[in-house]
Amino acid sequence: MNKKIYTGLFTLIITLLCLALPNTDSINANALVDATSGFSYEIVNNNIMITGYTGNDADIKIPAKIANKQVASIDDGAFSDNQSIMSVSIPKTVNSIGDLAMGYYYNPEDDIYVKNDNFKIKCYTASIAVQYALNNGFNYEIVDTKPAVVRGFRAVSSTVNSISLAWNQVATTEGYIIYSYNVSSGKWVRIAKTITPLNTYNLTNLNSGTTFKFAIKAYRTVDGTEIASNAYPVIIAATKPADVTGFKVAAESVNAIKLSWNRVSGAKGYIVYQVKNGKWARIAKTNTNVTSYVVKKLTRGYCYRFAIKAYKTVTNHELTSTNYPTVYGYTKIPTITGFKVAGVSDSAVKLTWNKLNDSHGYIVYQMKNNKWVRVAKTATNSNVYFIKNLASETQYKFAVKAYRSICGKEIVSINFPTTTAKTKKETVKIKVINGITYVNGVLIANKTYKLPSTYNPGGLTRETKAAFQKMQQGAAKDNVSLWITSGYRSYSYQALLYNSYVSSNGQAAADRFAARPGYSEHQTGLAIDVNYASSWFNNTTCAKWIENHCAEYGFILRYPRGKESKTGYMYESWHVRYVGVDLAKKVMASGLCLEEYFGITSKYK
């Protein structure tokens, strides 16, 4: 509220001053004007003297320099012609302020200067401006007072690579300066400066699992000088450890599961969790950066689920990784006891063992080609199993494991007992029907057992043709091409063939690779010469494929390597004989030729 200055001594003083003041219009007319700030000025003793203000702002700030010269003074009645000015910021370079320079305006009607009681001066401590304010009874604000010390400085959250800081706002501050302590140099380093009075800041791109020390100051800028609070609070904060990787079950036993994982940089240790009653429960907390843990006292044959987090401790607060990997573990079933051979025949073995009450069944294995092969899986807790379709007089090795199906996975015994058995000698039953010899139901034609000259199946039998076609298709999948070079041969054709070999090579030599008429397997319609009937075929890819796979289609290699004394014929890698899949697999697996398998001879009388 303005008030007029009337009579009395004060009025007389003002009047005398007014008479002494130079004409404002004449000053403005002669003064220079700074286009940037709007102040009019004169140059006095190579310094700037402010003589007026041409702008319309209510709150004005006098610059410390104009035209690269220091502002040193404010003229008498400098702002008396501008009634709208409510505050003036005065730089500390000013060392002289004239009478009625500010806070008054001239009233021409009454020809007096009127004081603005709401006027405020913004100035520096112990400056001429403070004295002016005191002398004239104006409010003033010391601009170089330091902001208050920041309170409530804290870390409100953190991630693997960021920390969010917060604090209580400080009045009359321009922003905040955040520092981080550099351990290597032992010094505080400024890392951020905000330009708004917001009281939060997010630090990013930090290393995971790392402890930091932060400090903060409030600041404001006065005439280009940064003025900060005297003291700064310090806090300790940390980024979260990275998520654990490589979490897995490293080993399982009947009542324990060993867990392992990759080391997490910056972690103090790890927290292991286990699902119990449908909820995650903390079961272990390591105090070192070890990378394995053994969970003990578990129930055998059971499914467990585990999880893990890395952690570090900051100001007695446990800081853990954001996410946690999970893994399923399965305790084993005890080893079966009492495994033995309970009975043997010429083609079967009876196995028995002691029951394991908490198993769902048993898995029986057989050693084949020096490898354990699963041959049976029972779905009941029966402790007896028969292995059938075995070759006679053959040594076999068996093993057994108990199993449980848990969480969709088959859990088996840790170890498996083994046992061996040798099948008995097969009782050979030889029958001759219409001059044709059958050994245990298998048609035989060799040097001992002759076919009638009239026997003619009409070519290759239907079963033999079909089986060979399947074998051709199977071989083609392995990029092996098979074809029939010789199949059925009649009695008369075999006689011509044999006689020509005798004529060329002599009978003794011919008898090693050619059958006499009536003794040839080709007359049965069950034998085939594949691709090339020549010794150069023996070590070819096709010959090796036939030896390894022919049994899958019901064929045997009729004259194997090293069996000439038993078969009566030299090794023929191209000659196969159809006997059916079951018998073919038994014969080929036994490593015996057909004569050895049945215990028969092949010699001309």
Image: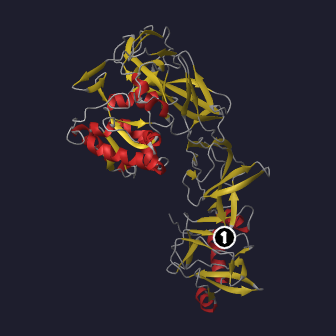
Q: Is residue 498 left or right of residue 242?
A: left
Visual colour scheme: secondary structure
Give whichever of 330, 229 is nearer the camera: 330
Residue 438 appears in the picture as rendered: yes
Give whichever of 446, 164 is nearer the camera: 446
Relative to 386, does residue 434 appear above or below in the rendering? Answer: below
- Residue 116 location (% of width, % of height): 55, 67
Q: Amino acid at mark 1?
A: Ile
- Residue 428 location (% of width, % of height): 35, 17
Q: Residues within 10 Å of mark 1 (few under 14, many from 20)?
A: many
Q: Residue at 63%, 35% (x, y): give it.
A: 312
Give whichever of 190, 108 is nearer the camera: 190
Relative to 235, does residue 22 appear above or below in the rendering? Answer: below
Q: Is residue 203 left or right of residue 350?
A: right
Relative to 516, does residue 392 appear above or below in the rendering? Answer: above
Give whichever of 565, 496 is nearer the camera: 496
Q: Is residue 457 left or right of residue 34?
A: left
Return the residue found at the far right. 185
Per the image, the residue denoted by label 1 is: 90
Element type at mark 1: loop
Q: Is residue 265 left or right of residue 444?
A: right
Residue 276 appears in the picture as rendered: no
- Residue 393 location (% of width, % of height): 45, 18
Q: How many marks?
A: 1
- Residue 561 location (% of width, % of height): 49, 37
Q: Quadrant of residue 593?
A: top left
Q: Quadrant of the C terminus?
A: top left
